[in-house]
């Protein structure tokens, strides 16, 4: 194995890791394929600032020029947000993008891979990929779920969007041996909405409790990660039934346009922003900032244990 040939960790991030200070990883697919320009650029700066406010160091991750970049410069962030010739990289795309020196935005799965390589334990995102509706026939199941079962990184998300089959997503996570913990809730959140109707077996009262669980998993050397469900702040959350209508429309449009494979999630995300007249984007931004705050608090508590 020759990781050093590929890993390019920003000095500030490397120093924090060496000194045992808290670091939070961030993905770049949420920027390149999850939000429109230039709102994504504003978000990219804001999310890093939120992590710093909590005393942690942010590390946004992307594949650029044949390197795994852990911690991006302003120029790199601009490239990822403009998203011209930027592909979407999950586990299966990883070696191809590095070997061909293509610019790739990392998903939850590939960001987890990079975080583990760099030694980062916490990662904040918006929503995870999962089992798509009808996935029991199409077998469209995000590689995010397998990664959570195999890579020791704790991922803070606002649950899974209603574009997915949330029940089957949770069943799959159970099969893969992934602990799913609610932060101050016993219900798995549904991204734009605080409630999904699916109860969780574990509700943590705060970030310190979650940090203790992460620490124990690390000490045991368990190979998988864990998923923390952190509901969207109430003042920005959307109504479940209203979102259901929007999502049914977006799914019908995807079907009609014949969208397949890795294009489906980005297509649906963009369509939902259009259909809600940008309202969903404001919610998306706020919940992702909230997750970054939560992940930074867990990382800080973990560093203090
Ligand atoms: N869900 C969202 N926002 C996102 C994504 C999913 O609500 O930005 C992105 C994440 O990067 C996630 C990826 O890892 O899409 C999942 O894509 P796929 O379903 O093709 O694995
Ligand atoms: Mn898929």
Image (tube, rainbow, N blue to C red):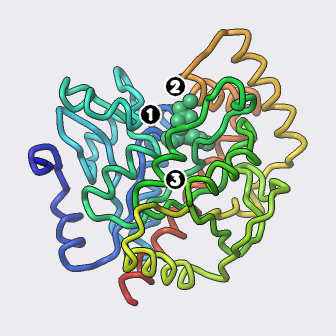
Q: CA distance from mark 1 to mark 2?
A: 14 Å
The residue lying furthest to the bottom in this view is 305
Which mark lies nearer to you, 3 or 1?
3
Judge depth for marks 1 and 2 and give the one in front: 2
Packing grade of label 3 (10 A; few <14, some 14-19, many >=20) is many
* Residue, disc 3: 125
Between residue 240 and residue 223, name the one nearer to us: 223
Left or right of 184, for residue 148? left
Residue occupying the point 38% across, 43% down: 110
Q: Is residue 221 visible?
A: yes
Q: Residue 184: x percent and y percent?
A: 70, 75
Helix, strand or loop at label 1? It is helix
Give yes or no for contact between labels 3 and 1 (Cβ–Cβ under 8 Å).
no
Q: Residue furthest front?
A: 175
Report, in whole angstroms, how far the alpha carbon at label 3 lies from the one at label 2: 18 Å
Earlier sequence position, callout 1 versus callout 2: 1
Q: Residue at x 46, y 57 (%)?
A: 47
Q: Nearer the viewer, residue 66 or 95?
A: 95
Residue drawn at (85%, 56%) of the image: 197
Residue linked to disc 1:
32
Of the four image quadrants, the one with ligand 2 is top right
Q: Residues within 10 Å of mark 1 (few under 14, many from 20)?
A: many
- Count how many numbered circles sit on residues in the image: 3
Q: Earlier in the sequence, mark 3 or mark 1?
A: 1
Q: Is mark 2 within 8 Å of ligand 1?
A: yes
> Residue 212 placed where, x, y %?
49, 84
* Mark 3 → mark 1, Cα distance in angstroms: 13 Å
**Residue 262: numbered disc:** 2
């Amino acid at each position: 194995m020759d990781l050093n040939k590929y890993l390019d960790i920003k000095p500030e991030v490397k120093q924090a890791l060496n000194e045992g200070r808290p670091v939070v990883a961030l993905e770049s697919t949420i920027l390149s394929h999850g939000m429109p320009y230039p709102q994504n650029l504003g978000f990219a700066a804001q999310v890093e600032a939120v992590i710093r406010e909590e005393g942690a160091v942010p590390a946004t991750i992307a594949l650029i020029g044949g390197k795994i970049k852990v911690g991006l410069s302003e120029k790199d962030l601009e490239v990822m947000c403009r998203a011209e010739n930027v592909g979407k990289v999950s586990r299966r795309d990883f070696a191809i993008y590095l070997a061909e020196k293509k610019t790739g935005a990392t998903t939850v799965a590939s960001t987890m891979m990079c975080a583990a390589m760099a030694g980062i334990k916490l990662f904040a995102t918006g929503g995870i990929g999962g089992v798509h509706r009808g996935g029991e026939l199409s077998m469209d199941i995000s590689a995010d779920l397998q990664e959570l079962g195999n890579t020791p990184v704790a991922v803070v998300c606002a649950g899974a969007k209603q574009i997915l089959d949330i029940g089957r997503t949770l069943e799959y996570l159970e099969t893969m041996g992934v602990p799913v913990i609610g932060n101050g809730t016993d219900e798995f959140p549904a991204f734009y909405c605080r409630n999904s109707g699916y109860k969780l077996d574990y509700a943590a009262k705060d970030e310190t409790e979650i940090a203790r669980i992460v620490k124990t998993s690390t000490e045991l050397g368990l190979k998988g990660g864990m998923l923390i469900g952190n509901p969207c702040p109430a003042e920005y959350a959307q109504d479940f039934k209203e979102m259901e209508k929007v999502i049914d429309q977006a799914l019908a449009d995807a079907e009609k346009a014949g969208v397949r494979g890795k294009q489906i999630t980005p297509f649906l995300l963009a369509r939902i922003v259009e259909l809600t007249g940008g309202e969903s984007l404001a919610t998306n931004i706020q919940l992702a900032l909230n997750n970054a705050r939560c992940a930074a608090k867990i990382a800080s508590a973990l560093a203090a244990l």
